[in-house]
Amino acid sequence: MPAGAGGDAVNEALDRTGFLAAAACLVGGYLLHAAWLPLPLVAAFALVAAFAATLVLAGRPPLPAVLRIAVMVLLAALVVRTFGNPFGREAGSALLLGMLAAKLLETRTRRDARVVLTTTCFVALAGFLFDQGPRQVALAFAVVIGLLATMALLADPRPARAGGLVARLRPSARLGAVHTLLAIPFAIACFVLFPRLDAPLWGAPADAFGGRSGISDRMQPGMLSSLALDDTPVMRVRFDGEIPRPADRYFRGLVFWWFDGSTWAGKDALSGFAQPPILEPIGPALDYEVLIEPTDQRWLFVLDAPAEAPPGASLTGDFQARRPTPVTGVMRYTASAHLAYRMQPDLPSLQRRAALQLPDGNPRTRELASRWAREAGGDAREVARRALGLFNAEFIYSLEPPLLARDAVDDFLFETRTGFCEHFASAFAFAMRAAGVPARVVVGYQGGFVNRAGGYLVLRRADAHAWTEIWIDGEGWVRIDPTAAVAPERIADSARAQFNLRAGAEAPGWLSQLRQRSDLFGYWWNRTLIEFSALRQREMLASFGAPPDPRVLVGLLAVVALVTLALASWWLARQRRTADPVLAEWRRFRARLARAGVETPPQLGPRDLSARATAALPQFAPVIASITAAFIDLRYRTRPGQHGDDERLAELRRVVRSFTPARARRGRIGNV
């Protein structure tokens, strides 16, 4: 059967407009993954898609099957080489995008285009595995409208008519937008009422645990300095009362005990001893609420020093807040802290040994620390004062610290003397231990940016910070930030703000306000939509007196679905009655006859109605006959898409709308 005949209509040849529309939808699907897709893959996919479009626009036949398979294999090999395997969230999504680009090389029929479009729908859905922000949703909304519009274009059985690309796509785009808007009420109902799981349905992909906060369970030189210019928000904090001053905004994350000469780690310390957290508060507690972005890690960040663990978490002996499961989505938790305190006044012997452990090497630092200890007579604060004095006198705080030699601490203290916060914290803790003072390194966030439009604190990756704690007899663990001795402005403000200030890149007032309001919208988005968990869904049901039972949710969702479907069907049926422009003009003509006193029962055909109208309104006989003849010709005799029907329809519309027998208008009324 030839293409386009009978049941083989789905295999009709695809014209250029249809191909370009399908390719544009695919590009929109690519944009949903642009933030994470590696540049070599973007270039390879774009090259294949551009080559496929060139073949179609030039009227060339598709590549032979052998070459198409070769391209597909090469793209798959590139994906595997980039990610190491074809499995996981990133690799699987990239592989699908590559196969879609290869599919364009053979897309020549409407069926091929529909395959591209339906797969692009899945690609758009997969984009939410990486980002669920408002920009991603807006782009996905536009992509869905484009997909529906292109599907409507491909479903049009009429042949291509003359006119530009925009003119051809405008009706289909309008139809796609209408159907998308009709789906929004049901989508909202699904969002609110669909039973939610306490964990993602797909679990955690094997490649999902990359530490999206930028902080891992180990600290090496350069780890935090690489984040110094990253403005990506990590968490937003709203306080019950005034926001603490910058010097008190230390959000504790990880505590590192073990040092091997270059890397600090703390994971093994948790199994080495189990000591309950002991805190003697001085003054009232400060309550606050945190909205944290996904970190893919099990620890939470809490203001120093935490009064208690956030709900669903526990405090370790060194005041790390940990959850049983990673934070894989936006999460909200409440906590409280004491800004003045005594932390663990008594130090167990096992912890003391861990806080004094030192690897071999760095002899110059050991000698210097021993001299400090002798001169200070064992006074821990005096030893710390001497070390801070050294930092304050001769060291430079830099966002681009140089590489260090094998004895990293010696090289930093006596040679480079340039570093970021982790360099100062590491060297200070080593020196304290070498002087016989128990010390440990703490990593978290410090400072932050106050969003005055929303009244909350924003902490970004650039606010990642490392400091030290030393144990002093009678005082317990005392926080000492050696970075403050070198760059006190770093503690008064963020590293990013200081970089902008030194570079003369301070934002104008209106731009700062715009940025704050944009962040406020992101805060509202995360708190209201992204953080709508199973717990909040149950709380919502309880507020309406409904039992938190999945069967209740399913029942409510079914009722809403039926009501929404009924309303949408009614609206579509009503629109369908006026969708035919020729029939719509005939109905308008009948309505005007009825207002002029002519009976127009629905069972009368066009000719019978014309005869009755002519008898009742003989002065309008030529016009009535002209309108009737034009309607019969356009409605029953003209094949859809026939050349000239648009012009005849426009003339019919003009004559019908100028036909006003009820007012017996004078003047000439033209013929169709």
Image (spheres, rainbow, N blue to C red):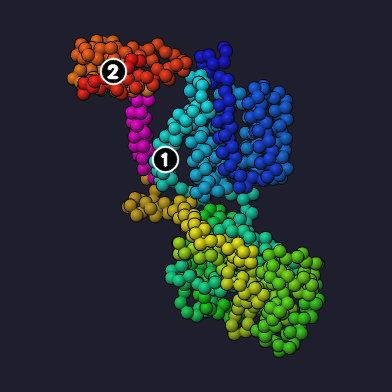
Say which quarter of the image contains residue 58: top right
Assign a secondary structure to mark 1. helix
Magenta residues?
Answer: 553-579
Asked whether 575 or 546 is in front, the reply is 575
Q: CA distance from mark 2 to mark 1?
A: 49 Å
Residue 447's place in the image compared with 326, above or below, is below
Q: Main secondary structure of the magenta part?
A: helix
**Residue 111: image location, x then y, percent:** 56, 24
Residue 139's place in the image compared with 511, above or below, is above
Assign a secondary structure to mark 2. loop
Amino acid under label 2?
Arg
Q: Residue at x 54, y 41 (%)?
A: 125
Give left or right: position of 263 versus 190.
right
Amino acid under label 1?
Ile
Asked whether 126 or 243 is in front, the reply is 243
Give the quarter of the figure containing the C terminus.
Answer: top left
Give the quarter of the figure containing the N terminus.
Answer: top right
Say which quarter of the image contains residue 122: top right
**Residue 422: image location, x then y, percent:** 68, 68
Which residue in the protein does label 2 denote?
668
Work out whether residue 322 can be spotted: no
Which residue in the protein does label 1 denote?
184
| Residue 549 among those drawn in magenta | no
Neighbours of disc 2 within 10 Å: few (<14), some (14-19), many (20+): few
